[in-house]
Image: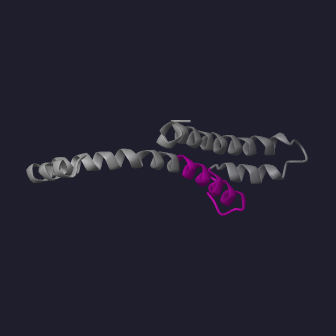
Amino acid sequence: MQPHLAMRLLRRRPAALAAVLLAINFSAALAPLIIQASLTMASAILIEAALSYVGLGVQPPWASLGSLLYTAYGYISRSASYVAFPGLTIFNTVWSLNLLGDGLRDVLDPRLRGL
């Protein structure tokens, strides 16, 4: 946008110029926010599972993958699948959220579109 055109638009309709600038900035900031949200959810799942594993998470009436992993650790001598299923569920959930964030970055990042 040329400077003199912007000044004419600002004199006539300042709300229109503000709306255009807001739309441009919002569309540029939306992709990093979506990617950051997916990666933050993966971190939150890992933190919750770790806190529940050491006993600082949700208490026994409610289930958590970390508390299931801690409970299953006492039965590891009977069957390794007691520990494997909650552990693999945590791994698959966090891995899929990280892949989602990486895929969204590849799709939404304009610097990578030319490659």
Q: Residue at x 91, y 47 (%)?
A: 77
Q: Residue at x 76, y 40 (%)?
A: 85
Does residue 55 sit above or below 24 in this rendering? below
Q: Residue at x 85, y 48 (%)?
A: 75
Q: Is residue 55 magenta?
A: yes
- Counting every numbered tag in the picture gives 0
Q: Nearer the viewer, residue 52 or 61?
A: 52
Q: Is residue 25 magenta?
A: no
Q: Residue at x 50, y 43 (%)?
A: 111
8 horizontally vs 28: left or right:
left
Q: Residue 28 location in percent, x, y? A: 39, 47
Q: Which residue is the extreme one toward the left? A: 12
Q: Residue 30 location in percent, x, y? A: 41, 46
114 horizontally vs 60: left or right:
left
Q: Residue 83 location in percent, x, y? A: 80, 45
99 horizontally vs 30: left or right:
right
The region drawn magenta spans 38-62
- Prevailing secondary structure of the magenta residues: helix
Picture quadrant of residue 115: top right
| Display colour scheme | one colour
Q: Nearer the viewer, residue 89 or 70?
A: 89
Q: Which residue is the extreme one toward the right? A: 77
Does residue 50 sit above or below 27 in this rendering? below
Q: Residue 13 location in percent, x, y? A: 11, 49
Picture quadrant of residue 49: bottom right
